[in-house]
Image: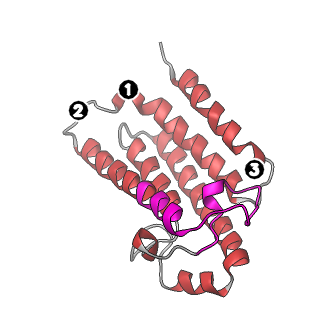
Amino acid sequence: MNYTIIIFGALSLPVIILSWRTLFNVRSHGFSRFISWECIIWLFANNYLYWFKDPLKLNQIFSWILLFISAYHVIAGVLLMKKFGKANKSRNENTLYQFEQTTKLVDRGIFKYIRHPLYSSLVFLTWGILLKNPDLHLLIVSIVSTIFLYITAVFDERECIQYFGDKYNDYRKRSKMFIPFIF
């Protein structure tokens, strides 16, 4: 029996619940992030059977490299945001989760090199999952996910410029969006 739809539905439900407040605000970074999350869930639901199949094949090796990079980006990003971002209720923006409501610009550690390690993590996750068992339909889903993560970052940067002003614009000049020294 193919469990793709069941897995997709089961994993989508919590994402819908967590994203509910931004689902109808197309101009918030939460909306495009939701679309990307759904793409990632679809990729996983289609490739879960291949997670550990043929572990020494080249696509599996590259997949694991991308997945480890993804894990590093999200862990480093969240830890730095919690430690230095000074998230608090004084920045009461209902489209942001509590940890996103930073009141200090974090520009050290991984943030010194890339502005969006959490979205970068999702890009690496997307392509890491695709490489478990690549096919054309999932390649298209991966491209859509990546485009929506780029859109997410663009909307997020608008929000950051609005909150942090010129300080964020200066930060943009000395860092990359997703991949250190490249993009």
Q: Which is more N-terminal, label 1 or label 3? A: 3
Can you give x and y, in whole percent of width and height, for residue 13 in the image? 65, 31
Q: Is residue 80 above or below residue 176?
A: above
Residue 35 location (% of width, % of height): 64, 47
- Disc 3 designates what residue? 22
The residue nearer to you, when weighing 123 against 18, is 18
Name the N-terminal-most of marks 3 and 2.
3
Residue drawn at the location 52% of the way across and 61% of the way down:
82
Instruction: Give the residue at x 58% y 62%.
Output: 150
Above or below residue 77? Residue 161 is below
Between 46 and 81, the residue placed more toward the observer is 81
- Element assignment for label 3: helix
- Is-magenta flag for residue 88? yes
Quadrant of res 161? bottom right
| Residue assigned mark 2 | 54
Element type at mark 2 = loop
Q: Secondary structure at mark 1?
A: helix
Exactly how many numbered labels are in the figure?
Answer: 3
Kindly report the distance in space between the C-alpha atoms of the residues bearing marks 1 and 2: 11 Å
Q: Which mark is residue 125?
A: none
Crowd tier of the residue under label 3, counting other residues whose Cα lies within 10 Å: few below 14, some 14–19, many 20 or above:
many
Which residue type does callout 1 highlight? Leu
Residue 120 seen: no
Residue at the spot of label 1: 49
What separation in Å lies between label 3 and label 1 (alpha carbons)?
A: 32 Å
Residue depicted at x 59% and y 48%: 36
